[in-house]
Image (spheres, rainbow, N blue to C red):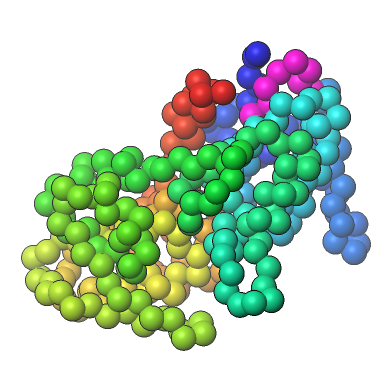
Amino acid sequence: METLILCNKKNIVLREHIVINRMIFSDGEKYLNVRSALDIKKKIVLLFIIGDEKTNDMFVELMLILDILKKRNRHIVLLIPYLFYARQDRWISRYCSIGLRSILYLLRIMGVRKIFTIDIHKLVNCRFLYNISLAPILRRIIISQHRNCRIVFPDLGAYKRYRRVFDRDKISFLYKRREGRKVSVKTKEKFYKDDCISVVDDIVDTGGTLEEVYKLLIRKTCHVYFYTIHGVFSLDGCAKRLNIKSFNTLFRRRGILGRCFFYSKSIITSIINAL
């Protein structure tokens, strides 16, 4: 079957995007209408979701887009770099919700056959959810920019997630402690002024952890660089709060902080070959 690639937003790499008329009612409800007719019958629709809005608004818009597409096609594949509610993947208390499970259930009902995501927070047992790791690409970027650098992970979770990729490099991790919204970071290892440190993490949301790591490491060394897969930047003042020039991310949702490496073309090509 032929594969048709569609995107919900205008993108430099993907020229084909859904032209949608968006209307918001006074109570905040959204209404979507596709301007041009889409020839999607007997095709595999690969829908690439780029998010630059709040998570809940973006999810509602995705559900409305799927409602339009599923009327003419039953072979819908989603590519969502930053999956909604991915961090809500386990039980915290006895009477708590698991957001990721609910989101996957709703997407399945709306006719989605497969979901591809980038570096999910934690792997889950789901038959139609596929995770693509960009950690090897991130390592190549770091090595090309800083050959003799030291890889530092801000917490134990990031260390366990990426230690196999960076096993050939000098790696270490910090001890992070969270009390409510306050984050504190400590280290037991020695750092020197001539060290080149590259801090690697999977998600940067509010930037609280990144700010504490920067304050800790800048006292001991002058060369500190930050690399992440997902630059979420949910707070409007996140870029001003961090004030870090040496920041790099593969996918960015909001903000103008640092450089953004976008590998969507190569990722989509590999997904098409796997369909």
User: Could you tell me which quadrant the C terminus lies in?
Assistant: top right
Residue 40 lies in the magenta stretch: yes
- Tell whether 260 sits left or right of 39: left
Q: Please say if 182 is above or below 159.
A: below
Residue 27 lies in the magenta stretch: no
Q: Residue at x 49, y 51 (%)?
A: 123
Q: Residue furthest toward the right?
A: 26
Residue 121 in view: yes
Q: Residue at x 24, y 63 (%)?
A: 152
Residue 146 in view: no
User: Could you tell me which quadrant the N terminus lies in?
Assistant: top right
**Image location (x, y in percent) of residue 127:** 59, 40
Q: Which residues are magenta?
A: 38-46
**Image location (x, y in percent) of residue 188:** 18, 78
Residue closest to the eye, 208 or 160: 160
Q: Quadrant of residue 199?
A: bottom left
**Image location (x, y in percent) of residue 240:** 46, 70
Q: Residue at x 23, y 73 (%)?
A: 217
Residue closest to the eye, 155 or 208: 155
Q: Residue at x 49, y 42 (%)?
A: 131
**Image location (x, y in percent) of residue 108:** 73, 42
Q: Quadrant of residue 91?
A: bottom right
Residue closest to the eye, 271 or 264: 271
Q: Please say if 130 is above or below 214.
A: above
Q: How many tags in the picture?
A: 0
Q: Quadrant of residue 16?
A: top right
- Tell whether 20 sits left or right of 214: right
